Amino acid sequence: MNDLVVNHSKSAVVVFRRSGGSLPNYYRFCCGSSEIGLVNSYTYLGVIFSSSCLFNKNSSSAVSRGEAAARALLSLVHKLNGCPISSWLNVFNACALSTALYAAEIWGLNLVDELERIQLRAVKSVMLLARNTPDHYVRAELGLAPVKCQLFKQALTWYGKICRMDETRLPKVCFIRLLHLSDSGLTMKYNWASQLSRFFNEIGELELWQGQDVSQITAQSDRLLSSMIASCRERDRVLVERSSFNTYFKLLNGTASISRYLEESTENVSFVLSDAYQSKNQCNIWECIKLFLIFLPVAKIPAMHTKITAVWLPLSMECQFVKMVAFSVLKEQLLIF
């Protein structure tokens, strides 16, 4: 009708099935006189659709894209010249993470653990931390919310768009069908509605989801997101408390924001550490303790090296003093955050 012509060389057929394996020989698809080939996966609008009805292959591709973008941004660390590390994190979230999470609200709700690797590997590389550093330590030190929170935010936005669609729109038709199937025991990995309901259940809002009052859910989206962030951070806090990886970290980290020494300018860090050393001020001494006991390896980073060496090298002859203060403060639990 519109004089459109099918480009057979760029066309393919994907037969979605759970069983896997090869298809019978009698499966043939033709368009006019030309046969269209069968493939196990096809990339459409930047998303890889696999015959398994899952998105594992697309997830791996997204992680690879995110890691490649993060590596390209590593050079910024050398150009920060003492600027807060949050500046790099903002660029990372805007470029690398947003690229990797393209349309993830549709395909990524069941692949959260895989997608978390994008953020954590990038941050560990920037901070020169060992790969076996627990993820919850890294998030606590930098005040990071898990990628799951970003996925939840995107999913809530997409849910609102679906619900505002006309009843004849295919996304709306599919969603209503998925809602019905979610009550029939269908495996969660094949059901987007069931996957989103699990997020609501994690923050104690399952009844809100089951009520399917669209106006209520969309109006409370900010509160729901805040609850998810708080839930994830509380989970990280508990993991830090129970972890044996580093027995000091749980005493040195008590806030949900990025650690102070990563944000201060060189001059401010110098002042804080010098004042802590000279006045034995226990409100500030934790900066010395943290640098000495936990994250001193970040001194290898050019941007952080300037901050640390400005004060730490003059104090290097007084390490015994820092040790003494560290253990006495920890013992008496006098740290004030």
Image (cartoon, rainbow, N blue to C red):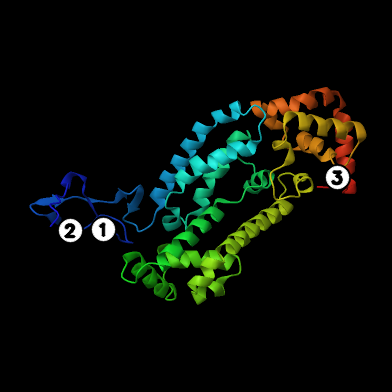
What residue is pinned by disc 3?
Answer: 330
What residue is pinned by disc 1?
Answer: 15
Instruction: Give percent across and percent down for residue 238.
Output: 70, 56
Numbered tag placed on residue 33 in the rendering: none
Disc 2: CA contacts within 10 A as few (<14), some (14-19) or many (>=20): few
The alpha-carbon separation of the residues under discs 3 and 1 comes to 62 Å
Q: Amino acid at mark 1?
A: Val
Instruction: Give percent across and percent down for residue 182.
Output: 43, 72
The alpha-carbon separation of the residues under discs 3 and 2 comes to 70 Å
The numbered mark, 3 or 1, whose residue comes first in the sequence reads: 1
> On screen, 293 above or below 36?
above
| Residue at the outermost left position | 33
Give residue 105's quadrant in the image: bottom left
Depth check: 27 or 102 in front?
Answer: 102
The numbered mark, 1 or 2, whose residue comes first in the sequence reads: 1
Q: Is residue 300 left or right of residue 322?
A: left
Depth check: 233 or 272 in front?
Answer: 272
